Amino acid sequence: MKTILIIVQKEFKQIFRNKAMLPIIFLMPIIQILILSNAATFEVKDIRLAIIDNDKTSYSRDLISKFNASSYFIVSGESASQKQAQQSIQKGNIDAIIEIPKYFERDLIKDKTGSISVQIDAINGATAGVANGYITQIIQSFNTKIITDLQAYQPKNKNQSLKMIRFNPAFWYNQTLDYKTFMVPGIIVILVTMITFFLSGMNIVREKEIGTLEQMNVTPIKKYQFIIGKLLPFWILGIFILFFGMNIGRFLFHVPLLGNPAVILLFSSIYILVFLGMGFLISNFTETQQQAMFIAWFFVVIFILMSGLFTPIESMPVWAQKITEFNPVRYFIEVIRLVMLKGSGFYDILPQMIKITIYALIMNTLAVVSYRKTT
Amino acid sequence: MKREHSISVKNLTKKFGDFTAVDAISFTVKKGEIFGFLGANGAGKTTAMKMLIGISKPTSGEAEVAGFDVYKSTEKIKKNIGYMSQKFALYDDLTVRENAQFFGGIYGLSKKVIKERTQAFISELGIDDIADHLVGSLPLGWKQKLAFSVALLHRPQIIFLDEPTGGVDPITRRQFWEMIYKQAHQGTTIFVTTHYMDEAEYCDRVSIMVAGKIEALDSPENLRKQFAVNSMNEVFLKLARG
């Protein structure tokens, strides 16, 4: 126990003596949360829209004015021809074309039907999907309006009219659909993951590089003392950054903390062990910090992309969803969102807790087994 | 303890696949002796030394260090030996005192003992003014002397020095050897590898390894006589060239 304490003391001295360390601990969380949570948004704004009005009637103008009124669209080139509009989409000057056909109004009144062509630049599938959603919404609301109008003109046809289905979506747990509320907890997780993973992995390889690890190996330090002494400081650092980040989220973005922070503390205590174990494992199989860094990056990129932070896991192909089962980052993001935004308690996150505990056990066992004082 | 030998080695062998790095070497080192372990680069010195300090498992053969078996009791060996490697092994980002605190601490010395012994070597080296400087800011010669002093903090029976004076100027080397002598007089066994043949002359006995085998083992004087030459340098060249 005393030996562990001596190692921990020494590590902390070295950590805080390292000039790059304090900015990593304090500035990195602030900058990442500020930039990423503002930049990594799912909101699509300012969709550049070309509307080709071949009808030029009150209905078509009505529809156009609805697009004009929406803050999501910038309507340009109302009179452009289809050819012109397609050239603009080719050049990337506009994102979508809406073409109102000739006799749009006449058909609507006569046949109770009309069609509008919508073409969307789908280079970025996600943006295209969102744009499509907005366009559909506006056309639907236009649709409802004219149904009402037509009914007023021809009351006899009441039974013929379409049943209006209104949906009033209610967004639970994030009423305002504020993506920051959604992103900030996830970004905190990424932050904690990267810092604990990289620092612990690099730290031990560094001792290998400068030769002090060999010196350690000829001392009577026990394996477990060395490992605990080495990793404990980064565990403490990880917990600190987690709560530091959560407070930044709370005060800058007003991200709520509905659940019990103790649940997050408990989960993250085990979660951080997973990455400390992995960092240690990598350092056992590498000789230089550079190698360790590349391997750690490889895993971190996969973990982040498959964590459900940027792309929902539900929309991944089934095989990819299976892979995310092995992604510890995914579980922490789920848990931190559940606890912070939904107020979930310990029993709600028990499945994730069990998985992450198994993960931590496996990683640390592998790390301990593969670390050898004697070769 | 009546034990006369600090280290006794019999047919110690280390193989890496087909390559035999250390080929059945046998020797003994007496208590308080300065034992020079010589050999060209790649002759197997470091590998042999690693087996003795318990960080490399022998393939076959027997060895006892400080009375403990190198197969069964590596941890006990580690408690009783000091080690200083050719790569400088104190922490650059800790001060002299902090390094001493750390290394003394992991050998289980009490804070008081560490403090006393640290102050003792600081006074002896006359380095009160730099004792609170980061080790990284000190010249190499100082670092080596400090590493040696720190490796002795827990008063080991044997100290292993792996090319301790590599890259150090002649004056500092001289001072370093004075420290070694002093320690040997106090009964510490010194096991030292070196490339400097003038240093070999300082040793009580010298072994010369060539291609994994010990080709010569005696006092520098006897070796010179045996090979009918005037210096250890010539002895070494005769042997190493084959």
Image (cartoon, coloured by chain):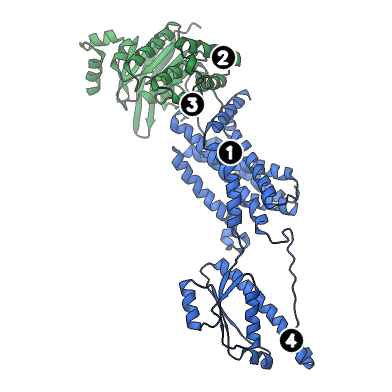
Q: Which mark is residue B115?
A: 2
Tell me how far mark 3 sits from mark 1, CA to CA: 28 Å
Q: Nearer the viewer, mark 4 or mark 1?
A: 4
Q: Is residue A222 visible?
A: yes
Q: Position of residue A180 (x, y in %)?
A: 65, 56
Identified by mark 2, the residue type is: Lys
Identified by mark 1, the residue type is: Thr
Q: On the rendered structure, is A33 left or right of A217?
A: right
**Label 4 and label 1 in one chain:** yes
Could you tell me which chain the residue with mark 2 belongs to?
A: B
Q: Which mark is residue A149?
A: 4
Which residue occupies the foreground of this view, B188 or A108?
A108
Query: Is residue B140 placed above or below A108 in the rendered structure?
Result: above
Tell me how far mark 4 sits from mark 1, CA to CA: 72 Å
Q: Residue at x 48, y 29 (%)?
A: A213
Identified by mark 3, the residue type is: Tyr
Q: Nearer the viewer, mark 3 or mark 1?
A: 3
Tell me how far mark 2 sits from mark 4, CA to CA: 94 Å
Query: Is residue A142 placed above or below A288 in the rendered structure?
Result: below
Mark 1 sits on what residue? A365
Q: Nearer the viewer, mark 4 or mark 3?
A: 4
Q: Residue at x 69, y 82 (%)?
A: A143
Tell me how far mark 3 sits from mark 2, CA to CA: 18 Å
Image hue for chain B: green
